[in-house]
Amino acid sequence: MRLGRIGLGLFFLAFSALAGTFLDTFDDGKLVDWQTLVMFGFEDPGSWEIIDGELQAINVGTLTLLTIGEEIWKDYDIEFDVKPLEKHGPGSIAVAARIEGTWGVVCRVGDSWDPGEPTVECFSGDLHGRAFVVYSEEPHRFLKLRKWSTFKLSVHGKQLIFSINGKQVLDPITLEPLHGFPGFLTGTVGLGLAGYTARFDNFKITGPRIPDKNRLSVTPQAKLATTWGNLKQLGFTHLLLKSR
């Protein structure tokens, strides 16, 4: 009996562990609560629309971010899929974190600021101005056109880790406060692009302060299968069966 109670407790603990995930698959065809932030304060945000359950963005100018969240959000992982369809000139694909007002941290892959080889870099600053600091920059090929890639940006405490397709592309970065710059300890999140037409999908944020919200359509059977799969990954299957 006691073992059964323990198993039941772990069952509910597993559900608690799954909390703190915001997921938008864009299947509902709506961009609720999303906002645009254009670098340097330019007025043209490009176009953002949902087509066939995927977010399509077209931008031929400067970097534009589509942001969501609360400025009190602190530690989280951001992950999404992106498929560039066409490159219109100098451009990049980006993920952003800890945005407060017009200040934020951005990691991107694409053309370097100066003409040259494509790079991957992370920088922070006033996204409406020209006050920036580049934390790290390394050569990196452009994303392949018409092929899905997965971006992941982990921001915990002062440490930032940027990965593409499961591979860390820069050494871990420490967000140190600089004179005249905020500490970048909390803020909203975003994805973005410049000089590209691209599709985005499966946008996910996980963290202790992230509200548990799923913007997708799934059947009850699919929900049950997902939950059972997560329980097995957590290693509770044997204990639950033994408690019967």
Image: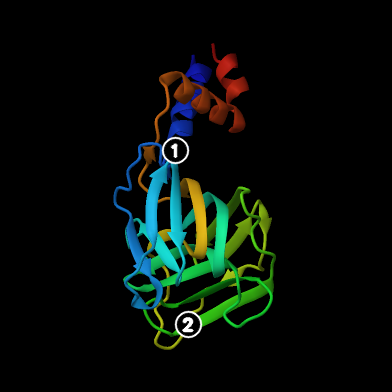
What amino acid does circle 1 point to?
A: Asp
Q: Which residue is mark 2?
A: 132
Front residue of 187/169: it is: 169
Which mark is first along the chain, 1 or 2? 1
Residue furthest out toward the top: 244
- Secondary element at image label 1: loop
Q: Residues within 10 Å of mark 2 (few under 14, many from 20)?
A: some
- Secondary element at image label 2: strand
Q: Quadrant location of residue 75? A: bottom left
Where is 85 relative to 120, above or below? above
Give me the disc on residue 52.
Answer: 1
Residue lying at 63% horizontally and 54% vertically, measured from the top left: 145
What amino acid does circle 2 point to?
A: Phe
Image depth: mark 2 or mark 1 in front: 1
Residue lying at 58% horizontally and 15% vertically, measured from the top left: 241
Give me the disc on residue 186.
Answer: none
Residue lying at 69% horizontally and 67% vertically, measured from the top left: 140
- How many numbered marks, from 0 up? 2
How far across and down, in percent of the image, does residue 68 sit? Answer: 35, 56
Residue lying at 57% horizontally and 62% vertically, measured from the top left: 87
How far across and down, in percent of the image, does residue 19 sit? Answer: 42, 40
Front residue of 37/178: it is: 37
How far across and down, in percent of the image, does residue 66 sit? Answer: 39, 59
Query: Which quarter of the figure is the C terminus placed in?
Result: top right
Where is 213 relative to 238, above or below? below
How far across and down, in percent of the image, does residue 31 sit? Answer: 33, 48
Q: Quadrant location of residue 135? A: bottom right
Residue furthest out toward the left: 33
